[in-house]
Image: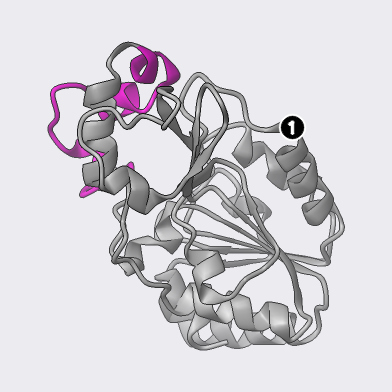
Amino acid sequence: MTVQEKIALLREYVAKSDRIVFFGGAGVSTESGIPDFRSVDGLYRQQWDYPPEMILSHEFFESKTAEFYRFYRAKMICPDAKPNPAHLRLAQLEKEGKLTGVVTQNIDGLHQAAGSRKVIELHGSTLRNYCTLCGKAYTAEDILATEDVPRCSCGGVIKPDVVLYGESLNLDTLNDAVDAIADADTMIIGGTSLNVYPAAGLVKYFSGRHLIMINLSTTPQDDSADLLINERIGSVFSQI
């Protein structure tokens, strides 16, 4: 089957579905200029004083907070990033009553910027930050406006509302994702390696009609898909 034939079949699946859920990862945002973690040009292959996976851990945040924020400001907050065709089409599908939810591993807020309202952020968001002492909320702009370790007006250290390595996913968020996936008649997975758990394990809760994979690289779930499209996700969504 050619790529165009696959996209035509995807259009047919979308047309016949009314409870689509989208599950996405870093590859959804790379076309917006946000680097992913594991590709050739991803953050994990860039040189820092410490490996990025160590920097983005709870232990590192607690013990070397200034170094954490040096990396975080430089690589994790992307104020100039804009939604790409995948984000925009998903938001449109929601408005059309086709899409019931977006479950994302991304922390950039681009789905909401595109207009999506039913977004389940498994790993939190760089757009939200809070004081570890009093809980006062701060924006990403507030963090960018500071140097060294950002502190609250009460003196407490400000922490991003992001799930770091060594931290557990929010149970309510996980349950919301399970409910959305279990209720879907079609699940589209895109831009994710499906290697990060527990997020990747959510796929097992889908029991609908069509499982669709849109990814440049292979995943452990490819053999389970009804439709597999190895193309850029923005390119595919711009045609459906």
Residue 233 in percent (x, y) is at: 45, 70
Residue 27 in percent (x, y) is at: 41, 58
The magenta-colored residue range is 36-62
Q: Nearer the viewer, residue 93 or 114?
A: 114
Quadrant location of the C terminus? Answer: bottom right
With respect to residue 206, does 130 lie above or below?
A: above
Residue 221 visible in the displayed image: yes
Identity of the residue furthest to the front in this view: 153
Q: Measuring 55% from the left and 83% from the top, which residue is drawn there? A: 7
Residue at the disc numbered 1: 171
With respect to residue 232, does 130 lie above or below?
A: above
Q: Nearer the viewer, residue 232 or 124?
A: 124
Per the image, is 51 magenta?
yes
Q: The residue tagged with tag 1: helix, strand or loop?
A: helix
Q: Quadrant of residue 58?
A: top left
Crowding near pointer 1: few (<14 within 10 Å), some, many (20+)? few
Residue 168 in percent (x, y) is at: 61, 24
With respect to residue 92, does 119 lie above or below?
A: above
Amino acid type at mark 1: Leu
Does residue 3 appear to the left or right of 22 in the view shown?
left
Residue 56 in percent (x, y) is at: 36, 28
Q: How many marks on residues? A: 1
Q: Nearer the viewer, residue 101 or 130?
A: 130
Query: Which colour assignment does the render follow?
Result: one colour
Per the image, is 37 magenta?
yes
Q: Measuring 84% from the left and 54% from the top, which residue is drawn there? A: 207
Does residue 129 appear to the left or right of 23 in the view shown?
left
Residue 44 visible in the displayed image: no
Q: Quadrant of residue 72?
A: top left
